Amino acid sequence: MNSIKVSVIVPIYGIEKYLSKCIDSILQQSFKDFELILVDDGSPDNCPKICDDFANVDKRVKVIHKPNGGLLSARKAGLEAALGTHIAYVDGDDWVDHFYLDTLYKLAIANDADLVVTGHFREFDGKIETIKPNNTGFYDEEKIKSKILPKAIYNGEFCEHGMSTYVWNKLFKKDLLEKVLFDVPNDIVMGEDAAITYSYLALSKRLVISKIPLYYYRQRHDSIVKSIENPKTEYYRLGLLMNFLKTKLSGVLDLENLNQQITYYLYSQILVRSGGLIYNEKRDSWFNPFLNTTKKSKVVVYSSGSFGQHILSTNLKTEYFKITKWIDVDFHDLKIGETTVNPISSISNNEFDYLIIATINPSVHKSLKTELELMGINQSKIVKPNTDEATIKSLLEDLGFNQDFIFNLNKTNSLTQI
């Protein structure tokens, strides 16, 4: 008789430095009725050997070696081999709490939940921050459709999710996940987690959200998204994700609500990927989303995360702003061009015109703005992105996205390489 209750699936590629810690944390779980499926997605480093070494000493470990096919293909391969009634995903460069599986499984069984969502820890440069989800509690099918789904992708404030996209802070039922995951095209290589999470949520009838943090997400310097390789290609990929979400959610959400959620989600992803500045060939002009700022404004950029890095990289090519300083509370050694990250205490009001907080999350923006105010920074100098819906829709149309959010790669009035 099969005693496996949870299959833990770890997609693996190029993370040998972190993999052993990840695997150890899973094998040391207080919960015992699980299997660990390590999916080596053609990793070019020492990861395949690390996987095999663990499998040789622990019978709970199952290893799949496959040619490189991307994250989705690895998750699918793991699911195909899974024997558990429930599925948990762990990224190979992260690690989990000792009671990770025990807590997830008890939450699922106690509530007969199709989906369990929990909190997590964010580890960056040795600092650990606790992230807790909103809307904790139990939701039946009616409440999922009326309370959760209408705000899951966009909660009404730009651009904050009502439910996180991540698959790794969640527990899924295998039989329901099989109906979702294999429908996600492998061509979706941006936002894979969102494609799984939101389409799965649309089929869920019982949901439990807990604030208990169980998962350690490692934000690495070398994992942050790098410069755009080709705008048209990347926006085409984003279009694939958005169109998939519209297709999967159209049966459970009001069309106006669904279009609004996806419009803001798409816009937010474009902002982060482009560093804010987007060239609109149709209008032969740069779209600058940062309210009040103009070309050659003296600007301080706050945040060395993905968005902040893209702002610096894009500005290095366009010289649109005069960036006087780059700051972050998570001060660390990072350099783009000749600009390095400095602590937030290093700035004064007289050296800049505007300060851009490089985040699309309004809760983070508000919190950081408060901290800056306490440091004596003039609040009128701190700017937000343009979130006018009509402006966003016009921009997306100009760039080549149609009403179903598919990006036309062949449209001439589109993006050019920065």
Image (cartoon, rainbow, N blue to C red):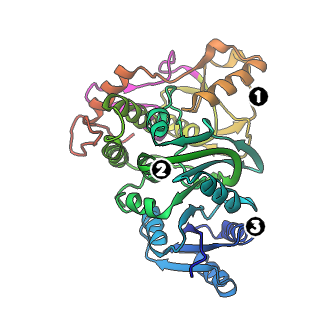
Q: Residue at x 28, y 42 (%)?
A: 407
Front-most of 393 and 329?
A: 393
Q: Earlier in the sequence, mark 3 or mark 2?
A: 3
Residue with the mark numbered 2? 197
Residue 87's place in the image compared with 405, above or below, is: below
Image point (30%, 25%), residue name:
394
Magenta segment: 270-298
**Amino acid under label 1?**
Ser
Q: Amino acid at mark 2?
A: Thr
Residue 159: where, in percent of width, then height? 50, 31
Residue 346 has which mark?
Answer: 1
The spot of residue 285 in percent (x, y) is 34, 25
Is residue 111 at all visible to an observer of this figure? yes
Q: Where does residue 63 sit, x and y in percent of width and height?
A: 55, 79
Is residue 292 found inside the magenta-colored segment of the image? yes
Rate crowding at label 3 as few (under 14), some (14 to 19) or many (20 or more) other CA atoms within 10 Å.
Answer: some
